[in-house]
């Protein structure tokens, strides 16, 4: 069966939100399949409303459909009600574009951006009619591929993936397509799947887990080695050198039902060099590549005209750092002044780069919500995490926002950070209270929402050696903050469930021994684990115990410098000794300047791949300027100085 619509249509009226499954978005394509074309099903392991806005998936969708030798469609995880019907009536996973069954594709490509979706990944593979373990797949089964930030440590799901792509997908997707296309056109002869995987393992940026053997000594990982000659010992990530070559998506999808981030999204740059030590996205996407001003302008104008959206988000990891951001926002405001009002949102704002200029420009358009992410409550803690924002930087940004008419804002924080004390935790409440007080001179009822997440150490960050806080410790800190904010007029508090943080931490730094645990949790019905109403901690911990694995060893243990980490055979370009030194500097509360505007300190992300930062304009951001760095004791921009390298004992001996 290829077309599942005749089976699907009659049941849609009996499930919630049937519009999730019908496709028909503006921007969607109905591709012409042909034997010589490689058919990709690009899948997101969560619901349509979470997955549709994913820009990575939309970019690959267009790039593949622009090729003569490829077609791409999309699939999202069916909610549990439809899944039940699908299993009863034997309806396989399908694309939303043409309702083609998933097993009629050559490749199922998943975007993995959250660890708690791993059981959904297995569920979708199974619904596709494909064996969940790669070793059981035959030549006529689709290849299961994954990309996205989680794949920088794909080891917990290594048994389920045929290949993994590290880094930017724009170029490598075509190279993979060519190899698979040749294999397909040669007839997919019996026994040839292994040869195909070996060939794919030779494509730069592609990791084929089955081509590596892993060994342990007791609980310790002691080796990860290629099984065959020609398979690289270390897989390097892919990086597109210039975003100007990739003005995608050109035809952003406009959903027919409500989704998150329902607006035009234009990526203004990729990469971040601020060096926040908790931030995996910032570390693994270096260097900074800004999109040319003119190209952003065109993408915004064309996108607004084509989609009819009245909001455009300029996306990146830190949008106010885009060189010339004020001019860009002013230009968008000016160019849309004659039409219906258009909101400009800058979803990732650093307070030290948000000034009166940007506030004024944004408020000329329609105002959207304002979110800042100071991440920690005290200057000491912000030095540890290298988010070198002074209290007065935050207050300046908040004052500018209230003065320009905003009434409410959100502040994001992490708790459970390395060396955090109760004073640091309570500093979050004090910052929020002070922000509300600042607002009182501009508005009668200022409101600040504090959102607190438990910190999860991630691979390829300086904190990859840190032992995550336990659930009781995170809960105690959240309770401390709840008490402190309850008494503060105008401050609301939201927090993430620490129990989910535990499992996220388990998956983030786990190894291949977690594969059977994930499979058993999935077989026991544990899907949609990132949804609080579906999350089931006891299911995870009970399964871990049955497999003789200790969550404490995986999650709460500090690692030592000489420990082999499960992702050490993969590379985001960053030198491990740079990350270790940065970890030691964190413990010594020593900051590190933004290398976009200061001399390179050779982390490896550019030097290893002969790349360099690309800035759109010679104008530095509000928070810094060329030829300067931050004075690490004051956080102010001054002539460059090297970071300190004080002699600090390792984390275990510090007792953090
Ligand atoms: S290689 Fe140098 S310039 Fe590039 S991100 Fe690392 S420190 Fe910065």
Image (cartoon, helix red, strand yellow):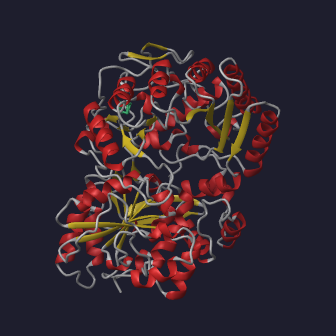
Up the image or down, 360 lies above or below 103; here it is above
Residue 102 locus on image (x, y percent): 38, 76
Q: Which of 70 and 258 is in front in this view?
A: 258
The residue lying toward the viewer, choosing from 595 and 60, is 60
Question: What residue is drawn where x is 37% and y is 57%?
Answer: 57
Decide which of 477, 360 is in the foreground and name it. Answer: 360
Q: In which quarter of the image is the N terminus?
A: bottom left
Which residue is pictured at 59% across the width and 69% down the height?
527
Above or below for 150 versus 417: below
Residue sitting at x 37%, y 55%: 253
Q: Relative to 285, does residue 507 appear above or below in the rendering?
A: below
- Report whether 133 appears left or right of 514: left
Q: In this view, does 278 lie to the left or right of 596?
A: right
- Give x and y (percent) for residue 489: 78, 30
Residue 242, position as x, y percentages in the image: 26, 39
* Residue 188 in the image: above or below residue 171: below
* Percent x, y of residue 541: 70, 65
The residue that appears at 71% across and 23% down in the rendered structure is: 434
Residue 443, picture quadrant: top right
């Amino acid at each position: 069966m290829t077309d599942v619509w005749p089976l699907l249509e009659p049941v849609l009226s009996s499930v919630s939100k049937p519009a999730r499954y019908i496709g028909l978005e503006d921007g969607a394509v109905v591709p012409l399949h042909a034997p010589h074309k490689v058919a990709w099903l690009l899948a997101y392991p969560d619901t349509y409303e979470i997955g549709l806005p994913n820009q990575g998936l939309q970019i690959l969708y267009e790039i593949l459909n622009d090729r003569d030798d490829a077609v791409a469609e999309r699939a999202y995880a069916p909610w549990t009600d439809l899944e039940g019907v699908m299993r009863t009536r034997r309806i396989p996973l399908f694309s939303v574009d043409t309702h083609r069954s998933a097993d009629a594709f050559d490749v199922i490509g998943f975007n993995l951006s959250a660890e708690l979706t791993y059981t959904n990944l297995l569920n979708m593979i199974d619904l596709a009619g494909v064996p969940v373990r790669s070793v059981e797949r035959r030549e006529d089964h689709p290849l299961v591929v994954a990309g996205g930030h989680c794949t920088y440590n794909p080891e917990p799901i290594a048994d389920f993936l045929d290949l993994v792509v590290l880094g930017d997908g724009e170029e490598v997707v075509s190279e993979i397509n060519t190899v698979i296309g040749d294999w397909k056109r040669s007839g997919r002869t019996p026994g040839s799947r292994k040869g195909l995987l070996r060939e794919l393992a030779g494509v730069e940026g592609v990791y084929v887990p089955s081509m590596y053997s892993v060994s342990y000594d007791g609980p310790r990982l002691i080796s990860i080695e290629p099984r065959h000659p020609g398979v690289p010992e270390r897989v390097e990530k892919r990086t597109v050198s210039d975003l100007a070559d990739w003005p995608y998506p050109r035809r952003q999808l406009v959903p027919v039902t409500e989704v998150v981030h329902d607006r035009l999204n234009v990526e203004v740059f990729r990469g971040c060099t601020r060096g926040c030590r908790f931030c995996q996205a910032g570390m693994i996407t270096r260097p900074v590549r800004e999109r040319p001003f003119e190209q952003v302008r065109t993408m915004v104008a064309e996108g607004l005209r084509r989609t009819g959206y009245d909001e455009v988000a300029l996306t990146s990891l830190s949008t106010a750092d885009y060189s010339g951001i004020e001019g860009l926002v002013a230009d968008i405001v000016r160019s849309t002044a004659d039409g219906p009002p258009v909101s400009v949102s800058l979803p990732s704002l650093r307070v030290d780069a948000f000034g009166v200029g940007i506030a004024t420009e944004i408020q000329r358009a329609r105002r959207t919500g304002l979110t800042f992410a100071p991440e920690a409550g005290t200057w000491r803690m912000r030095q540890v995490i290298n988010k070198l924002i002074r209290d007065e930087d935050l207050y300046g940004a908040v004052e500018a926002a209230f003065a320009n008419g905003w009434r409410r804002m959100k502040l994001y924080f992490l708790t459970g950070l390395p060396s955090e004390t109760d004073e640091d935790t309570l500093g979050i409440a004090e910052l929020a209270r002070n922000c509300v007080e600042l607002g009182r001179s501009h508005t009668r009822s200022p409101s600040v929402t504090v959102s607190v997440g438990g910190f999860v150490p991630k691979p390829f960050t300086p904190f990859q050696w840190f032992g995550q806080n336990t659930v009781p410790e995170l809960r105690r800190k959240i309770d401390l903050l709840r008490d402190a904010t309850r008494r503060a007029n105008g401050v609301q508090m939201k927090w993430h469930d620490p129990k989910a943080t535990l499992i996220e931490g388990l998956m983030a730094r786990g190894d291949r021994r977690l594969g059977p645990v994930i499979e058993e949790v999935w077989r026991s019905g544990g899907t949609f684990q990132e949804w609080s109403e579906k999350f089931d901690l006891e299911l995870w911990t009970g399964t871990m115990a049955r497999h003789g694995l200790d969550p404490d060893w995986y999650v709460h243990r500090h690692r030592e410098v000489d420990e082999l980490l499960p992702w050490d055979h993969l590379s985001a370009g960053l030198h491990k000794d740079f990350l270790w030194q940065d970890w030691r500097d964190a413990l010594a509360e020593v900051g590190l300047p933004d290398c976009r505007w200061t001399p390179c300190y050779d982390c490896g992300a550019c030097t290893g791949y002969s790349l360099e930062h690309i800035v759109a304009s010679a104008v530095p951001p509000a928070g810094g300027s060329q030829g300067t760095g931050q004075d690490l004791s004051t956080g102010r921009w001054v002539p460059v100085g090297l970071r300190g390298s004080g002699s600090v004992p390792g984390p275990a001996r510090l007792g953090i």
